Image (cartoon, rainbow, N blue to C red):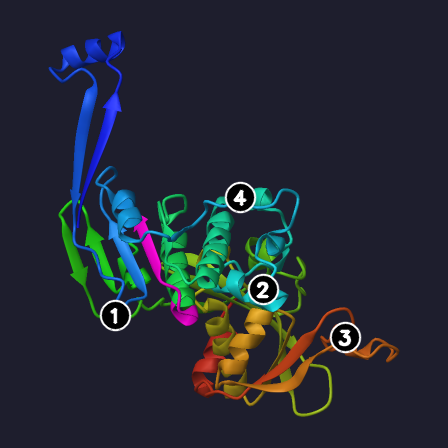
Amino acid sequence: MEIVLESRVEPTARVRQVAGMFDLPAGGASETRVRCEMPGADEAWTVGLVTGPSGCGKTTLARAAFPGAVWCGESAWPDGRAIVDGFGPELGVGEVVELLGGAGLNSPPAWLKPYGALSVGQKWRADLARGIAEARRRGAVLCADEFTSVVDRDTARTGSAAAAKLARRLGVRLVAAGCHDDIADWLDPDWIARPAAGSLARRSLQGRPRLELEVWRCRVEAWDLFREHHYLSHSASPSSVCFLASHAGRPVAFSAWLPFVGRGPAARREHRTVVLPEWQGLGAGMALSGFVASLWRGLGLRALSATAHPGYARARLKSGHWRLTRAPGLAARGRGGLEARLGRASTRLTAGFEYVGPAMEPRRARELLMEAGR
């Protein structure tokens, strides 16, 4: 594909002065050519990456190659309305929540804020979610310009993985255009176009890199770093047993557990599990929760959890390591508060689960549990 762009500039006095300083033509017409092969519409692909230095023609190439595409972030969000109201009326609440969570925006309080009140990273994820929804509705390609340019590199990598996963799950073609190619492994595109070199590389999917987490027991004070990001409460019981997951020395997720008060064999129940926003969308919360649950099972205890978060419940329903013990529902009122004390709410739907996955080796579980909280 070859694109020829012509632009004209009025030869003002200032233009002539600057042109004279550098022996350049003063105004008139200028021509830019962009040559790069692009995949055909009839080819089997879902995710593509157009990358290269600024000014090499990435956006121009994408617009020419995919006419009629939806462009991420081009439509304004409604003023004074929560972002959940920024999606088309054809979508149900569950579908909107799935789109936002799938894009890595897993914070229900953020879902109820107007777009202008979100952080830069949250806006980027919200734009991706709505763009994917619109592209799916229209049966069009979604192009995301300046992809990851406005977010830190941790968010760029995790957000790329989340966006690609969501696009593939929903069957939406996503084309990311941006200067940063450090996301290529995480986006795992079917092809990479480099306009500056005029090259197109078709590739077989490699799978995104593994996110390796280090987990250790920590003090409850570590909750202070995560409290603002929990979807229901900013408090954590001071008597909870807590664990911290980190990646390359940077905190990622926190999980706190308490004894379960109720019928049946001895058990521990999940009290709080939170993932920092820049790491959401990769399943770190599920991984940490399952790791701690395997620890309890290795010590001969049941591991129980009740959740109101639809994404968390959906992930556990799909997992072979968790068994649904109570379908989503409300606590019955008038029971002396017992249901609420056992973690079942009377004002929101919650679902109950028990961990049935592999148990941690008992000696390892005891060593981890006996670590001094950091």
Mark 4 neighbour class, 10 Å CA radius: few under 14, some 14 to 19, many 20 or more: few
Q: Distance between the residues labelled 2 and 3?
A: 35 Å
Magenta stretch bounds:
168-178
Amino acid type, mark 2: Leu
* Label 2: few (<14), some (14–19) or many (≥20) C-alpha neighbours in 10 Å: few
Q: Are marks 3 and 1 in contact (CB under 8 Å)?
A: no
The residue singled out by tag 3 in the image is 341
Mark 4 to mark 2: distance in Å? 18 Å
x 25%, y 39%: residue = 54
Q: How far apart are marks 1 and 4 (CA)?
A: 34 Å
Under tag 3, what secondary structure? helix
Q: Can residue 280 be seen in this view?
A: no
Q: Which mark is residue 76?
A: 4
**Whether residue 281 is visible:** yes
Instruction: Give the alpha-carbon distance from disc 3 to disc 1, as whole Å.
Output: 48 Å
Q: Badge 1 is on which residue?
A: 205
Instruction: Give the CA separation, mark 1 to mark 2.
Output: 31 Å
Q: Earlier in the sequence, mark 2 or mark 3?
A: 2
